[in-house]
Amino acid sequence: MRALTLAEYGGPELLTVSELPSPAPRAGQILVRTAASGVNPVDLLVRGGAMAANISHPFPLVLGWDLSGTVEAVGAGVDRFAPGDRVVAMSAQYATGIGTHAEFVALPAAIAAPAPRTVDLVEAAALPLAGLTAYQALEKLAPRSGERLLISGAVGAVGGFATQLAASRGVEVIALARPQDAELARELGASSVLSADEPLPTAIADVLLETAGIAPKVIGAVRDEGRAGSIYAPEPPKAERGITVLQTFVEQDGDQLAILSALVDEGVLTLRVAEIGDFAFGPEAHRRLAAGGSRGKFLLTP
Ligand SMILES: NC(=O)c1ccc[n+]([C@@H]2O[C@H](COP(=O)([O-])OP(=O)(O)OC[C@H]3O[C@@H](n4cnc5c(N)ncnc54)[C@H](OP(=O)(O)O)[C@@H]3O)[C@@H](O)[C@H]2O)c1
């Protein structure tokens, strides 16, 4: 089977389309014929070796943390899915060691969910990792209806899902976005949009969700005793003025992913795709994701 692999840590030019043996599903696993898998910022970290201490995986390393596809076979004890089912899944590589940029992927049934029925199966690959991160960060921060939630990077992959989820729950979303993204932020559900290029007013939000890596610039916008969440580990918000800081590192979860799939079908969440290419597009997708400004996911098809 084809897979996008890495023989050593380094730059995007080291990504190689390889032939590997197809896996077989073990007990509790499903074998997925991949429709597409997303390129996420974490793939850039894995590729460069920044997660080498967390991921014990023999080379060649198959990259990729999420996918959409069709169940090809099921292992012993799996009753959650049957061959032919359309699924999405997120595989936290530090936990599973399983990469998703492969034609066939065997992964635990518990981390998969039915794919949204109303979108193309390839586009469904835009959902798992970014959707779960937004969902889990909001679970931690628990913004209530009527509270003001400032989201930095509000039109990014995670920030965009967080904006849609929070707005659908009656939370007043204040988007922090680049000036050219103001209209998109409103389309996603933001009540107001502030420019990331201007100094922020102080104490305008009860809660902050920081996805852009600019915590020191934005923490002043949170009121005393508010909550601040980060998904951007290198520069988390600092606890000050009684603000509770809540970090999220995304975890695989088939049940939460099923909730997100249903929200896509209900029209609460829209999936945004920047470009779809085959595995040979991998190096270019990595470069473009690193460059920024993409406004949607890069998806790779086998
Ligand atoms: N902890 C976790 O579990 C977890 C999970 C997923 C992602 N992450 C991390 O979270 C971050 C966001 O991930 P993502 O997939 O949402 O990435 P993304 O799609 O690239 O979104 C990031 C957004 O932030 C914006 N941004 C970046 N710097 C900015 C600045 N100085 N001012 C204003 N806006 C700025 C970007 O705009 P431009 O494109 O114009 O720069 C983009 O809209 C990444 O660092 C990723 O590694 C962590």
Image (cartoon, grey):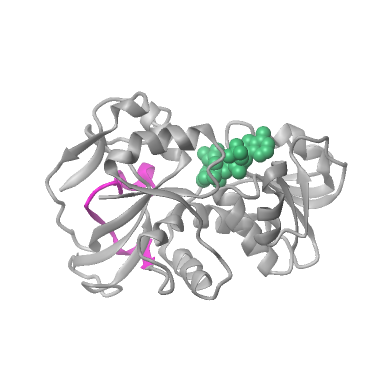
Say whether residue 142 is left or right of residue 232.
Answer: right
Q: Position of residue 180 (x, y in %)?
A: 69, 44
**Ligand 1's quadrant:** top right
- Where residue 276 sits in the image (x, y, percent)? 38, 50
Q: Is residue 257 left or right of residue 18?
A: right
Residue at 24% in and 48% down: 102
How many numbered marks does the figure carry?
Answer: 0
Which residues fall within the magenta stretch? 91-113
Is residue 110 a member of the stretch shown in magenta? yes
Say if 49 sits above or below 149 in the image.
Answer: above
Please name the residue shown 42% across and 69% down the image: 119
Residue 185 picture quarter = bottom right
Residue drawn at (30%, 43%) of the image: 97
Q: Is residue 187 above or below residue 13?
A: below
Say whether residue 256 is left or right of residue 179: left
Q: Nearer the viewer, residue 126 or 79?
A: 126
**Residue 31 pos. (x, y %):** 21, 60
Task: Examine the image and state in which quarter residue 200 appears.
Answer: top right
Which residue is at the front of the view, 87 or 95? 87
Position of residue 197 relative to residue 79, above or below, is above
Q: Residue at x 42, y 55 (%)?
A: 252
The residue lying toward the viewer, choosing from 217 and 247, is 217
Does the image show residue 52?
no
**Which of the 4 image quadrants contains residue 146?**
bottom right
